[in-house]
Amino acid sequence: MRGLLLCCFVALASKFELLLDPKKSYEYRYEGMVNFGLGKQNLAESGVKITCKVKITGASEQTYVLQVSDLAFAEYNGFPGKNGYDASPELTRLIAAQLVKPFMFEYANGHVGDIRASPEVSTTIVNIVRGILEFFQVTVKTTQRFYDLEEIGIHGKCQSHYTIEENLEAKNVTISQVVDVTNCREKAEMYKGMATSVVDNISKQRGKSVYSTVRNVYTITPSTEGGLLTKAETRERQHFTPFNVKGGAFKMQAMKELVLLGVYDTASTPTFGPMESKGNIIFKFANIHSNFPILMQNLEEPIPKITKLIKRLAAANSYQVDSATTEDCIKLYQLMKVVPFEGLNSLWKEFEGDHEQRRWFLDVTVEIGDARAFNFLKSRFQAGDLTPTEAWQTFLMAVEHLEATAELVEITKEFLRIPYSKSDTNLWHTVVLSYGSVVYKHCAYHTPCPVSAVQPLLDMATEALKSGKKEDMILILKALGNAGHPGSIKTIMRFLPGVAATPKDLPPAVQSAAVQAMRLIAARDPHSVQDITMSLFLQKDLPSEIRMLAFVILFDAKPSMAAVSTVTEHLLDEKDLHVASLAYSYLEGFARSTTPDNHFLSTAANIAVKILAPKFGRLSYYYSKAKHMDWFDDNFLIGTATEMYMIRNAAYMFPSEVMMKGKLHVIGRIVELLELGMRLEGIKELFGAGIPGFKGDYSFSDFQAIFKVLENWESLPNDDPLFTAYSRASGQEWFYADISKDLIRSIVMALNPSAWRGSPLWTAMESLKSGASWHYTRAFLILDARYFQPSTLGLPVEISKYYNSVTVITANAKAVAKPPPTQHLHQLLSSEIELETDGFAGVTKNYWVFYGVNTELFQSGSEFRNKVPIGLPWKFTIKFNIPERKFELEFPPCTKEIPLISLRADVYAISRNIAEPDMPKETPIMPHPTESSVESQKPMNTNYWHPSYNMCAESKIYGVGVCMDYDLRRQYHHEEFPLYYFLGFSHMELKIVPVNSTKTVEKIYFEVNAGTFKHPINAQQLLQTLAQLSKKATQQVSLGSDSSSAERESHSHQFEVKSCGRDSTPEALCNFKALAMDENQKYEGYDAAMYYTPEANAHSAQLIVSQVGANTNWKMCVDTSVDARPEAKTHLRWGAECQSYEMSMKAGAFNLSSPKPTLKSKVQFTRIPEYMAEMGKRAERYIPGMALLLGFYQEDESYAKDEVSASVTVASEDSIDVNVTFPEYTVYRKAVPLSVGFQNMTTAQ
């Protein structure tokens, strides 16, 4: 009986198992469409649709032929419900030319095998066929209603969940298949431009930026031969956002349908020409390097197009950035991607003779990113026709943009052997360090990474260790640090004290480089790095600098809770307070960390800090410190981290190393930003443990003591640099330099005013006589990050980010000295120098984000564009009269608008195709309505927001103004925050504008005179008046309620004596003028003079500002005084003859000899303008809320209406009490903690 039931089940299963009869032909109707947008009715979308007939004919038992006919291709670009698909006959013809050719595929047991096609059929067309054939990739198990399988499909090897329903009336079964395309074990996907970023899997648990679902539904009718596919449909949904998909996303919806039209007996086997294998059903990527998603152009005959573009861009940006042409850089990069190697040599011959065009060509060559670029550079190195600066800059940028294949690793090895690479120190450093970067990028996509890639560096390290050359050892260790290859650990250990099998006495700089060489290996082989760094840290006989660096690298390897506990226990017994201080401060930062990568480490660090705080929590900044600060937002999936290290030694005053670096956390990846560091070897030795005569108050005597030590710099050893500086970007060290005694000596000699003819400074001055020019241009693709994946239609879906900049700096200058120096430059100190200069400094940045389908034939998707031009043009004349201590500056009048910075951004629904590359369809996702239509839409669309603003600050005196305006258009949906905050049109601009005035401005003139100058006519009268007014103001402003009456009277009397008893003549310090001259040579503007009044126990100064011009008496008078208490007072009056408005300020320190010294300040408003009073009221309303957030308390009570006072009192060694009194309330907080205690500061001094 059981056997009979088993046979029945098997028979039932065979009836529905999807089969194709090799003796029959099957004709289907196929329709596929994909759509991109935001899924809102009033927001634009784009898409494509393919319809055709598909005929499948048997060729042999397991081989079938697929033929396509009646093809139609249509594009969609517009608004749902308002626009439809538009046919594209020309593109249909181009696609049909390949798609109508026969395709052969193997098929057995419901699975598609090898696909074959004519050699000329492109991968893009084969992928479309894969999308059709995927309907036949189904596993039927009618013995089970639900089952899970891992099987291959167009998305890769993914998990599928099947559900089967049998329809007895229709006598068929419906099979539902849900494919988990997000978590495929072998996923068809590709990344580009992200080799130096680290994947953060814990961040992905907090949210994803891409989420996809795929559901296939098959209708299978049974037959005697097996199941017949009568209908199938697929729906794929994908959500993408630069942030967390939970907060709104762009949406892709792909649908395809296959409907059986008929089954026929095969009359004859179809014939076809030669075919080649195109692979299985899994999607294949093609032309990803040359298919730029943000533009489409004809790539045939690229060389003449490149020639034309480079010449046009060089001419357009010859003086300043032409923002209208910066997008053409992307066109140029794409054309360079398809130039053959021979074409690069011909282009070099075209441009090498023109300095501007040569620079543009070298800048864009690096964007090729494959073997052609490096073979071209190799030929240039061998020919030696690049300057060293051109060579290292171009090589460095080429490595930054390369796709590190095994072939490229071999090519870059050759640069280590080319003699020209060693012709310049910077060039050799760049070649060696960059080779390490190539190895790192290669290993990012090849695991395990072959040791052969890093072998040249290992051999060089061995040779450097044998020779004992310090510079060579440091360079190779830094290159090994860039490579981050686990196979280099044994070699690195040979340079480390305490772990090397045969220890050598190596300089501290070499040992430091060896420890830091493990920084990137920490992510690839964390266990080995933890073992080594833990061993170094626990060996207390090793130099403290090495132990501290090892501690930092140990935490780069993300140690376990047990490892952190081990470190904590040993720190409790640590005698070296520098090591303990750095470790504790670093743990303290990790304890507060919120970034996902430190999720577990922060817990362990938090416990460690609680254990260590009683012993090390109050160590001052005299000791070594490491600070870690970060933040992370789950809505944006974005965060940043900053780390700073100051590594000191008890025997020296100066730190031995100072480092600072930053990280960016973005959508599941960690990107190392810029890192800067200095090693202060020579300076540390020069200053030793302290500076003789240095008291710590930074007085003039302190600076004298510092300079006295600096005079001994010549006594340092010639071998050791004064200091070493380095920089890393994306975790890769790209630059380091030793600042040696010889370099300092040459700079001092070059800048010596007593230098004779022939010195560099003299030569520069001579060139300025006849006029000198300098021009710099650089086009740079800063970011080219792309992610590729297939859609169910077989069309590639791409998420790309491009960030390009064009920088231009131009400076023209001409200088004349009267009289000119004849013997040495010191003679300039008795000359009047006039310098005329004009120029431009600016950059235009373009940023794109694309999400959509991108092939060499068509593009469809959503595109964000952002352009930010920043520019500062100048033209002025400077005059220095050194004997008279006079400085003059003249500007021409402002005659046209000068944009300083602007921003323009929008999101578009994009449709492009190669049949009409110059006619793309671009619809703003949010339409730009006129103001009238906006008003009419407001009742219907309450989410529409359109703020706009224009503000100008104008000066009719100078005929110039500064304007800022912005215009935003948004549609808000609260459930889709934060994405919708950034979508829509944005425009902001800051610019200088001409202002119409009654008089024509001929020039704008500034003068600073620190020599003798004439007093203004009424200066003495004003100074006498200031003294009288200051006596009155002092009587009005009291020191505070806690001062005694006698004390206040005494202070008031002292200031009265000082104010009224000024017998001495005020000394004029300097005079400042800011004037505009009209066509009648008359001036308007402002004239300011500063005076100093000598007094016995105080420093007093007065400032008088007068408006220059007819019928004006506006002035501002300021009287300041600082006495020995210390106490500072300022009395300010302004308006007509300084009589309209008045205010006074006072600040002083009290109880300095007590344990709780106090700093008090008070501002009194006697008479102020209405706008200032209104601003004060607004601030008074705003402050309580902010004070509450900062932990302050509030007491409501009425005080003097015309004053604000504040006091800060030392409450303990590491806290203060703060009290601020306003007219209607007081805010206060007790025991505000300080990161640096007062006792610690005293200890540090």
Image (tube, grey):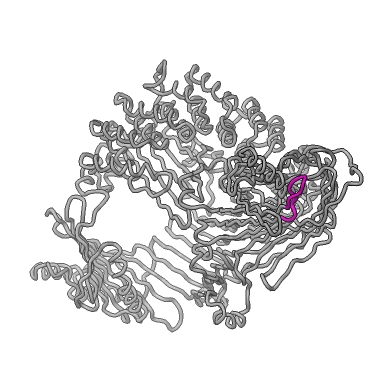
Give the vertical position of 802 relative to 450 (above or below).
below
- Residue 966 location (% of width, % of height): 54, 71
Q: Is residue 655 left or right of residue 663?
A: left
Position of residue 353 measured from the top left corner of the image (x, y, whole percent): 74, 43
- The answer to whether residue 597 is seen in the rendering is yes
Quadrant for the N terminus in the image: top right
Residue range highlighted in magenta? 221-231
| Lateral position of residue 577 relative to residue 69, left or right | left
Q: Is residue 389 above or below residue 998?
A: above
* In the depicted structure, whether residue 796 falls above or below residue 688: below
773 over 409 or under it: above or below:
below
Count of numbered circles in the view: 0
Q: Quadrant of residue 660?
A: top left
- As for residue 225 lying within the magenta part, the answer is yes
Q: Nearer the viewer, residue 232 or 769?
A: 232
**Measured from the top left, where is residue 137 in percent x and y?**
70, 45
Residue 942 shown in magenta: no
